[in-house]
Structure formats: structure tokens, C-alpha cells
Amino acid sequence: MYILYSIPSTASCLCRSVPSHIPIFLCTYSSSLYTCVNSHNNLLTDPPWTSQRRHFSALIPKKEDGKKRVWEQSQLLDVLEARIQQLQSDIVLDVQHAKVQFVNASKSGRGASSGKSHKNVSGGRTELPKKLIQEKTTKTKKLNLKLGIEDKPVKSRKGKLILPGTSKTLKNQEPTAIQADTMAGAPVAAATVPIRKVEKLEWKLNQWAMSASPELVQDNSEARMYEGVQLSVHCYLEACVFCGDIDRAQRLLLTHHRMISRRNLLNIGLYNVMMRVWAKKGSLNQIGRMFILVEEAGLKPNLTSYCAALECMGRTPNCSPKVINRVLRQMKEDGLCVEELFRLCVFRQDERDMVLRAIHTVEPDFQPSINTVLHTCSSPLVKDFYTERADAKYPKLAFSLEELRERFSRQLSMEQASTITIHSVEAMKPVTPHMAKMRALLAEQRMVWHKALVGALRESNMILASITPKAVRLSLYPYLCLMDQKDYVDIMIQSLSNLPPSGESLHILAKELGNRVHNKFCIRMKSHNQMVDKLSHIYNEYAELLAKDSQDFDVLPRERWWKLEAEHSSGPSLLGDNTQWPHTVVVELGTYLVDLMVKHMKVNSDILNPANDRKFIPVLYHMYTFRSNKQVGFIKPHPILTQMQQDAMETTLTFDSYVMPMLCPPVPWTSAKFGAYLLTPTKMMRTVVGANQHEILLEKCQDADLHAVLDSLNQLGNAAWRINQPLLDIIISVFNDKGNEKLDIPPPNSEAPKILRYSQQDLATYSSAEKAHLKRELVKAKKKCSEMHSLRMDALYKLSIANHMRDEVFWFPHNMDFRGRTYPCPPYFNHLGSDVTRAILVFAEGKPLGPGGLKWLKIHLVNLTGLKKRSSLAGRLEYANTIMDDILDSADNPLNGKKWWQNADEPWQALACCMEIANAVRSPDPTHFISHFPVHQDGSCNGLQHYAALGRDVIGATSVNLIPCEVPQDVYSGVAQQVEEFRARDSEKGLKIAQVLEGFISRKVVKQTVMTVVYGVTRYGGRLQIEKRLKEVDDFPKEYVWDASHYLVQQVFSSLKEMFTGTREIQDWLTESARLIAKSGNTVEWVTPLGLPIIQPYHRTRTQMLKGTIQDLSLQITHDSKQKPDTVKQKNAFPPNFIHSLDSTHMMLTALYCYSAGLTFVSVHDCFWTHALTVDTMNKVCREQFVALHSQPILQELSNFLLQKYCSGLS
Amino acid sequence: MSLHFYNILGDVVSIIPPLAICPPCPLSPRVLLQRRTFSLDSLSSGPGRPQPQQARTDRASPSSALTHRNLSAVAVSVQDQSRPLGRYDFLDLGEVEENTQRAQLCRTIKRFIIDPALAKLVTHHLGPDLEDSKAVIFECNPGPGVLTRTLLNSGAQRVVTLEGEKSFLPDLQALECLLDGQLEVVHCDFFKLDPMGRGSMRPPAMYTDKLFTDLGISEANWTDEVPVKVVGIFPQRIERSQLWKLLYVLFDRLSIYRYGRVELNMFISEKEYLKLMAKPGDMLNYRAFGALWQMACHIELLHKEPWASFVTSSKYKLAIPKSRLPNDNLCLVRMTPRKDLFSASLTPSNAATLVMMVKQCLAKRKARLVDRLNMWSPDSGPKLLKEMGMQEDVLTGHVYPEEYKQLFELVDKSQEFTQSWLYEEVLENTQKEGWI
């Protein structure tokens, strides 16, 4: 039954090859389907939760918030349980409807009572603790004041007490704690009362903590770990340490430690930062002090703390074994073991060796065990993939080991430089004297600015350094000392050349600058930690797995890398442990740099026009623009700068290194934190800046559960690419000529409409209507200009990168979004891009066409034209054969011939395909023709396919080609037909708009809306889409566009409802569940069938103000997990996100099994690419995996998961 | 100077007790009204100016006409209901409770004037010479029509009700038929005139030129007398954006302002009023919004009325927006465009630049004006300030609206500024200027 991918006759022919699935799937369900529908109807007409809602509202008054939440939780429970019942009824053939309802009815009573009791527990939970903590801290503070005890003397006394020798420190740990207590408590009898109060509060707190479920507490502590203050202090300390300002770091930690209110915010990680510093210095005394501070703060030393202590002892010559033994004993008492230390700690530089040396003094034979046991992913979907490896033939790359190693070293040096400057494709134009003059001028100015900025930065740094910061305020100073001033200035100058002439909002500009600094810092950090050598070493061995001239391996890239890393365990860890800076720091730092630029970059006003007076004017301005009543700070270049840049037409472009595709195969993802580029930090899951809930979730995951996801990312990243040179040359020639809007090559600015300037005098002669018209024209021209500029620049970047890579073989490392959809990391030039970029890319590896390859190329070409949508594959092939003349003409004379290709839907890809076909048919034997060309297989409305499969929707499934048919089904035409029926009916009834629309309803009008309905498009958005389509129809009366689009969107929605009954039901169930989950104060989470945890990071907006010298910035934060969830977003986004997570799962499964079949495979979400030779195999895998995926009880598992996650407190 | 005067007005007006205490006796409102007109009139002519005695004698005729109508109110019960009502026939306002219920049935969330006393007060403020005034009165969203009838009862010559809600139309139209041309009912929402969107134009959305052409009101010179007085309540949720929109069309002389100096008599929330009237030096509240309104219009606070006096259509309570500023009342504010707003150097065609300039300056009130000016044209700042007679270090938040206008006139004359991006910027911020 599974003809997934639009080419339906493939489906029918391939279906025969996998017939066994059809009966299993269809027969089982179709026989039960009708009974199920009945039961669904029953449930639908009187949904269980409505009756219970009534029941509950009588029982529990709505007013109180806590009660309401519980009530909603139990409602959720019922919805979920109802779904389980439904699902069970789907599976069990003889469903007894009465029983289902009975079970539901009985639930209500229990739900209510349990809800009530739960409330009692949780009622105070939200309010109480915070207040208590506050009260406690203020009381303690007051108490301390009263007793005349300042924190400081106490500490120094203690410090002195224990300082001489760490041995004492460690031994005396417990006593000191007691001493401290007695010291605080002893002095005066009068103080006992307040103390008791504090104790009482503490007791209450404990009580509360005990009553809370353990999971909750854990969640809290984890959330706290990432809390703003800790993160910013951590980054501050790291930055201080990196630039060698240890005093500053120590001072900051101590000030925080001394203030009780602040101390409560610290965690062990912050103390560890300092311990590591002292360990490097070999200062045992300081380490001892840190341990005391940790104790004092009520924290427990963790592995890293002990690691630092041992490292320090390792560095100390002749450290007494007694001391080391004591540390080890202490570790054991804290429940930590030495093995874990080597397994879990992240080592920098020679830390590992030092720790080992310390341990060897007491245990000379100790060797950390290398854990080589590989756990495998538990998902049944990939069990075969991991266990049955005998038949697998993992693909190799067409390179020798030597070549790969050489490529690696080139990539490494590129990343170390952190930026790369390449020639733009405009360099091919001749240089006029004026251009030369302007280039010289610009270069000269850059030097001037560079010098001015370096000076300014140095000066401002000096000022910053001299200011003694207020107690806990974190200054930017350490972040400004991470590199040479000149490096910062390079970043600033680089951003200047990317600034669009219409300016950029301060926030965006600041973010870019801040991120660049962070990136550079991370790369420096890695080389500072001496991990580059180790990386090279491991990579060079890893390359054996991929190289064609080395032995075959039966392991996956991830497994190989993991093993190599375990074998070479000495030296620094490859895993970078530097934390992402908080967003506020990034923006603040960026704003600071922008401010310097605005203040210190000046130019003479007569530089271009000697007639002007000579004045020193700033190159950048800060001003405001007003966007719908909001004022946005903007940085604009002075027209002089824009003029210079445009006239100079500079031929070099500077990019961050990660913008370029990789020159060697990417580092395989071995965990959620490590993979992709060699040095540039990359997240496996792209998220909104600052959102960390995904990371927390991924960290909590069992390693093995992520393996399938990691492996599929690795496989996508390992596909090698190269440039289709003939096509690139044609495109560049069009680009450097005048562009071509029809072919999607943006014209240069010289082709832009002129912006007319009008003088006041002229205007006076116009009437007000004319003036309004003039103004509108002007605005339109202006808008067009800036649009053209950004399109042109985008194309320039893409083509220039492609041109730079023209003779290379390259790779796109992949990561994914939070739903698991995969993306290539390089942002501009990748295979996900437009028709133009896709056309330029071909596989680096070539494979012969084989017997069916030419056929696939031809079909692929017809698919690209967008013609023959309703023909079978044979029909399309036949069509291709009839137009061979046009195809060959297009290939031979692309720009001067009949230009058949230019009318295709995807013209450039069509042209590329024409050329490939021409080459193939002209070769002596097409079956042996080596083709690098990727052939695409596109899903037909993929979202609906998943819905139809989930809902076992026979009619729906047929219309999206999940069931074999003679001709391909087209869901869009189906919907259009249905809409037309509605329209005819309404027209007869005399509805004006229905009559107007006669003859205008087509597939094209409804297509986009149908496609996006599954992804949650609303009526509002749908109407806009249809409005756009209607406006394109020339003879449609314009005055009716609004009414017609309004009417049509309604009809499309009701048609879909009629055709996809199951879809609607599932969507409604998902929406309702999400609504209740969000209302109960939780965010919606689920796990994909491949084990990837997903969380929707939508929360209510919080505004954060950032003070800056230029202006204050207010940041809108929508992902703060401490805010309540945004119910509307949670609920609207759940169905589409869930479907996306399923389609990504299906893609990953296909990727994995294609890998073991030795195929080259890449994907653009639901469009899969492979060589013409292997299309058939890929289609087979794709279908098999779709069936396998949907044979899983997906909805049932989702329901179970939600029940367990959100309702376990209730039952 | 002018600001000072507003302040006094605000204080004095607040002395007047709310009308709720007014007894139902037919004579007493008149007494009360006269006292009120007196107190207000003495203020509106400004402090220091001698009190013109003439104003009071002028009012003799309208008030006697008013007596006439009030007398006919006594007679109305015995009159034959079938004949068309003349201009001196008293219109029954209907039961308060019934009107309240009708107002509450309205589908969109709005506030209505139902209290007869409040309606009377508003009518009075629109006066004093309703009978002789040539200005057409536009009443926005009258709902059950309490204010409409009160206006007619006070002898208004020509009232146009712009009702956006279909359900109120039949009743108003019935009234229209009864009368002899004093009332015209149009299905139109004043706040949806000249919409920016591209949706189909059908009532209640409308283009101004259609409305005015249908009513037979032609374009007038800016210096002519006020052609139209608009009375109504700003919808709460779009209050601010409506005020901005009106401001833009005012400076561009588009939309309703094509037809002359249309006078607004609108209820706005107290906080918005306070922001509107914020004075230089009040760094928190003095913004472009207020400065521009003060520059463009003569603004008078006519009356403050607690929120509770209005009937809200929604069954949920329409929450009163919170604010740092006091916000206990709706304020009836009269905004009359200044006759001398436009001059040789400030014309509707360059006024958009003035608006942009003020917005840029007041985006940050604690910035130095000279820096802003230098940004637009290097080195010109000190020169301009000298010409203006201002201190070098004056902050943008300390400059009076009038001074901004003068400054702009200087800037516009100067050659250096014509190339400045300030002019360019006007073109880019077009989203709010789509009105014709």
C-alpha cells in the first residue's frame, strides 16, 4: 500500500516487490476500521471530557488557581485515557462500546478525589518556598548584623585556623563546619530567639522539600544550575581566568560568597573554576581554602573538585601519599569513585596526566579502565540496523587516506584563522580607474579606522580596568581582554562591510559582533587547552574508516571515533567544556563595540566631493526607526560610506570560517555536545538563543538512546559534494550581466528603479491625490531597492562561495532543529537552498547509470518542470522521450537556443538535468555513464501522509498516494474539486461571491493552503495565501479578491475536514492535550520513536532591559522556563511539531538503512536525493521504513508518555 | 505660556462636581449649566486677558431656545405622536435601564453614554451656541442614541451619527425619519475611516471622501472656521494608535483634515490625556506623541468623568488599563487644530519630516539636542541653537513643542540639511502613513 513518494507508478511497481506489508497493514485495519469509526463517533458526539467538565465544575469551584490546575490535570488525564481507549478499540477487533464508556465514567470520580488530595499537597508548593528562602536569608543577615559578626572576619579566622597544610584542612572539614556553627550561635544569649526562628524556617523548608516529589526537586536543581546568575558568573570567571586575571576572578567569587543572598545562588561549578586555576598553580593552600568555602556554602564537592585537588597534588613535587590517600578516602565517603573521575571529567591540557600521577604515588598500578562496551539504541525500529551488520556495506569515500589527512589539515588551519577571505564572483569584471581609486580610498580609510579603534579600545579598557566594580556587578572588562585589541577591531571592521545601506538594528548588529567574539574565543580556548594535536591524531586514524585504500570496517563513524578517543585517553579531552555565554553578555558586549564604532570611526566629509566643507563626520549613526509604534534603535552607515562601498565594488568577501562548507568529512557526532566542525562550536540542536531546556533534556538522555539520531546526522554529513562547473559558469555570466528576475538571478543595483527626488516647489503644483500617488511610488521604489540589494547580496555570497569551491570536494556538517528536522550548518550555500544553489551542487562521487538510471534522469527532469503532474511514471518517461529535441537544445544552447528549460518550475535544476541527459545519451553506453547527478524523490504532501497513516484514513491515504492506484492521486486537485462542488451549491443558492468565483477554482489556488494546513496554518494565513494566488489570476475582478479569499479558505478547510476525518480527530486530540498540559503549567514534551526527546520552548514573554551607553535595549524572551507556558502557542504548535518530528524520524530511518545498503543519501526534509542508479533501492527503503514506523503504536506511546509525564501525580 | 494655561484649566475643571447629583427638576440643570459655562468660559480665554462681558449676553438667545424646547417637553405627553417632529419638539431619551440593556447587547466591546445627565453635560460642552453654529456634529458610535437625542433637544442644527454597529441602525434611522433633516444616520465607524489594509471596503469601513461627499461637505481652507465637530469615545484598545493616526493625517492634511480644521471632542483615558499634555522636563512622559499634539492643536480639558459612569457592552468587565499615571477617569478633551499651524515654511508636504524630527529627538529625552542636530548635519548644531537663543547643552526633553516647530523651520531653510538622511528616513517609516 505504500507508495509514498509522488511518483506513483514506482509505487505500484515497487509495491509488488514488498507485497507482504500491504496485507498486514491494510487488511487488519480496514476490517476493524468501520467498527472503530463507530466508536469514534460515539466518543465524538459526547466527548468524555465534556461530561466530566460539568461534573468537576460542580465539585470544585473554579476560582482558586491551584484547584483549577489540578482540575485541568485531571481533565487532561481523562482526555488521554479516552484516547487510550480509542486506540485500544482500534486494535481490538471486537470493541464493546458500552465498556469503553463505562470505564470512562468511572474515572471521573477517582480523578476528582485524587485531584483534591493532590491539591492539599501542592497548594502551598508554588508560593511557600520562595518566600521562605527570602525570609530566611534576610533573617540570617539581620541576625549576623545584630551579633556584630561580619562575614569577612569569620572567614579569615577560619582561613587562618586551617591554612597551614591541606592535610589538616581536609581532615578538619567536619569540625570546622561545626566550629562555624558554634561561632555564629554562641556569642550572646539574646541571639537565641532569632536563631530559633531561622531554624524553624529551615525546618519548614525541609518539610516542604520532603513533601515535594523527588523528581520535582531534581528538576529544580537542574534548572537552577543554568540560572542566569550562575551562568553569567561562570562565564565571567572563565573569561577572567582565560585572560590571566586570576585576582579579579577570585575577588568576584569571594564577594559573592560573602553576601549570603548571593552565596545561595552559587553552585559547585563556580568554585571548581577557581580550584582548577589554583591546581594549575600547584597551590595546595588555595585549594584547601576553596574546599572550606564550598563547605561553608553548604555545597558538596563533586568529581571536578576532587579532580582539581588531585591535579594540584600531582603537580606538587613530593606530595605526601598520606594527603593523597585522604583525598581519595574523602571521595569515597562522598560516594564518588576514581573510575568515574576519568570517565566523566573534562580535562584540559595536561590535567589528566597530573591526576594520574597523583594517584600513581599511592597506587602505582592504577590504570583507568577503558570502557569499550557499546550500548545500542533500544528503539525496535533500528534494532536490525545495529545488530545485523553482516550484510551491511557501509559506503567509503573516493579518497585515499593521504588525501583525507591533507584535507583535514587545510580545514584545521581555516578554522584556526576563524575567518576566511575569498574573491567574489564580481572580481571577474574589469576594473575601472574610478573603482581602483575608490578601493584605494576605502583601504586607506580602513587603516585609519583600524588604528582609531585600537586606540579607543585600549583607552576604554584602561578606564574599565581602573573602575573598582560595585560589589556584585559584572563588568564587561574580562570579555574585552580575551584577545588582542586588534582582533576585536578586525571583527568590527568586518561587520562594517556587511552592513546594508539601509542600516541594521542595533540589537542584531550587537548580537552578531558578540557572537563573533565568542566564536573566536572558543577556538582560542581549544588551542589553549592543547587539544588540537590530539584532535589531529584521532582524526587521522579515524580517516581510515572512510578512505578507499584502507581496510573495511564494520562499525559506524560514531563508534569508530568513540573507540579511538577511548584508546587515546591521555591528554586533554576533546569535548570542549566552555559554556555558551548568556545572551545578555553577548548583546552587551556587542553594544559596547558598536558604541566604539559609532564614536570613533570618522571620515572627512569632502572625501568624495571636494566642494563640501571639510568636516570630520562619523561614518555610522545611531538613530531610531519606528515600526508600528515601537521604536527600534538602528545603526546606519553614512551615505558617503555607502557610496564608497558601492563605487569600489570590492572583490573580496570575508566570512566566518563556519560559513564555508568543510574541506574534510565532518567530525562525527558522538554526543549531543561534540561533532560537526573541528573547532567551531556547534550545537547539535539549534535553538532560540538562550533557550537551554533542550540541552538539559538531551543531557538527561541515556547515551544509547541518541545513537540512531547521531548516526543519521553523521551519515548526512558524510555525503561529499562538488560543484557543477558548467552550470555555475552560466549562472555567474547571467549574474554578472544584468541578472534575470524570471530565472531568479537577482539583478544588480544599477537595474533598480531610480528613486525620484522631488523639490518642494514641484510638489506645490500637484494636487493632494497626485502627491499621495507620488509618495506611494517613491515608497515602492525605495522598498524595491532595498529588497533588490539584499537579494543581490545573498546571491553574491552563495555564488562566490560556490566559485571558491569550484575545484574542491566538500562536505556539509549537519545538525537539527528542536523537532529533529535536519539542516546543513553552513548558512548561505547548501543543498537546502533555492533552485540556483541546488542546481550547482552534484555528488562528488559518481556512479554508473545502470539499466534504469537514464529512465530516472528523464523522469526527474519532467518532475522538475512541474508538468504532467497527473501522469504515471511511464507517462512522464514517454513525455520526456517526445521532447528529447528540446532537452538536447537546452543543454547545448542554454542561453541562445529555444530556451525550453526556462519555462520549467525549477529552471536551473532542469537545465542541469538536461545537460546530464545529453551527456548520458551521447556517451557510447549510457548504462556505464558515470553520473554525479542527484535524483530527487519528493513526498506528496508529506504531512498529510503521516496523518493519514496515523489515522488509518483510507480515503485520505488514497489521495496522498499511500495506496496504489492506476494514476497518481493528487490531493490538491481533490480538494479543489471538493471546493468546486461546495461553490456550485452555494452559487445555486444565490451567494454572490460563489457566482463570481465560477471558473476560477483551480489546483493552484488551493495548493499552498492544503499543504500548510497540516502544519497548522490558520484561517488568517490561509486567506493571505489564497489572496496572493487570486491576485495572480489576471482576469479575476480585483474588487472581489478579499471576499473571495475569505470564502475560499473556509471551503478549503471544510473540504479537508470531509476528506481526512482521522486527521481532524488526531489534530483535535493533540491540540486539546497540549492546551490542558499548558494550562496545568507544563510545557509539552514528547519522545520520537527514535528516542529523541522534544520539548516545545514556548513561554510567556518576559522583557529584560539592558542598559547601554548608546541606548537601552529591551530583549523579549519567550523561552524562559521560569515563565508560565504560552498556552496558545503550545497548543497551536503541537500538532505540526509532532508531525514534523515524525517525518524527521522517517527521514532518519531512511538515512540509516540507506547507509547500510551503501547508498549516497541526502535529504531536504521530505525530499530524498540519491544517485540515479540507486533510486529504486532508496524508494524501497523509504517505503519499508514508512511502514515500519507506522507499524509502531505511535499514538499509544505518545499517550502513555503524556499520561506518565503529566498525570502520574494524580493516579 | 500656553501650557501654563492648560494646567489651570485642569485644576479648575476638576472642581466641578459630577453631574450625578443633579436633581431631576427641569429648571435646575439650566442653572447649573450656566454656572458651568461661565466658569469654563472665563478660563478658555486665558489668564490675564480681560473678561469679555459680551460673551455672556450673546448666549441669551440659545438659552431661551433651550427653554422653549424644555417647555415643549412638558407638552410632549399630550401631543399627537404621528406628526413629524419639529425642531422644538422634545425627544424622549428612553428609560435608562432599557438603554443600558441595549448597549450591553452590542457585539463589539465599546463604552456608551447612557446617563442623561452625562449626555447633557457633553452637549453643553459642545455648545454653547448649538442652534446657531454652522459646524456639523459627527457623533461616533451613538449606540442607543441618548447623546444624539440630547444634542437634538438642545437645538443642534445638523447631527450626523456614524454608527458602526448594524443592530443600532434601525432605531436611529427611525428617528432620522421622524425628524426634519437635523439628523443623518450613516453606517460607518469613525475609527475605521481610510483603513490601511487592503480588505474590501464595505461599511462600517469607509473612505473619508465618500463620507464627506455624500454629506455634501466640501474641502475648506485651513484658516476657515471649524467645519465639523466630532464627539465620541476612543475605543480603549486602539486609543493610542488612533491618536497617532489622526496626528499623521493632521500634519499631512489628509483624511478628515482635508475638509478643514475638524475639531475633536473626545473622551480619552486619563493616562493618555496626561501623556498628551506632558510638559517639557517631565522626562518620563514628555514624548513625541504629546509634543506633536500640543504643537498641532489647541487642547482643552472639558470634563473628567469616572469610568463607572459609562456603560460597557461586553459582559466581561472591560479592564481599565493600569498605568503609573492616575487613570481613574475618562477625560472629555477638545482638540482644535491651530489656525497658524501651517505657514510658508511648514506645509503639509514637509510636515512629515517635522514629525520624524520630533520623534527622533524625543526617543531619548536625556540626549543633548546639539548632538541630534549634529547628526543630521555636522557642525550645524551650535549655530542653530544660537539662532534659537537656546543653551548649548539643552536636552531634547526640555524643548517646548513650539520651539521644535521653529527649529524645524530653521532646519528646513538651511541648505545643509537637504541631503541629510532625516529626509530619507521619512520615506522608510511609511507604515503609519498609508492614509490618503
Image (spheres, coloured by chain):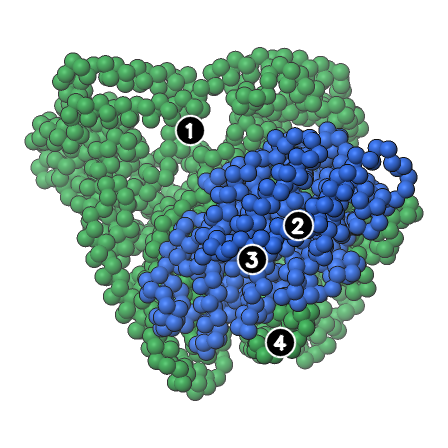
Chain colours: A green, B blue
Q: Which element is circle 2 on? A: loop
- Which residue shows up at 62% across the image and 66% down it? B223
Q: Chain of mark 2?
A: B
- Which residue shows up at 61% across the image and 76% down it? A763
Residue topped by disc 3? B297
- CA gap between label 2 and label 4 equals 43 Å
Please name which of the two marks, 3 or 4, marks the residue nearer to the observer. 3
Do discs 3 and 2 belong to a common subunit? yes
**Tag 2: Cα neighbours inside 10 Å, few (<14), some, or many (≥20)?**
some
Image coordinates for residue B346, horizontal then vertical, percent: 54, 70
Residue topped by disc 1? A219
**Tag 1: Cα neighbours inside 10 Å, few (<14), some, or many (≥20)?**
few
Q: Is residue A980 visible?
A: no
- Which residue shows up at 87% across the image and 36% down it? B79
Q: Chain of mark 4?
A: A
Residue topped by disc 2? B59
- CA gap between label 3 and label 4 equals 24 Å
Q: Chain of mark 3?
A: B
Decide if residue A969 is on the left or right side of residue B311: right
In this rendered view, identify the residue nearer to me: A356 or A158.
A158
Image coordinates for residue A559, horizontal then vertical, percent: 43, 43
Q: Which element is circle 3 on? A: strand
Please name which of the two marks, 4 or 1, marks the residue nearer to the observer. 4
C-beta proximity under 8 Å, tags 2 and 1: no
Decide if residue A204 is on the left or right side of residue B102: left
Residue topped by disc 4? A764
Image coordinates for residue A552, horizontal then vertical, percent: 46, 50
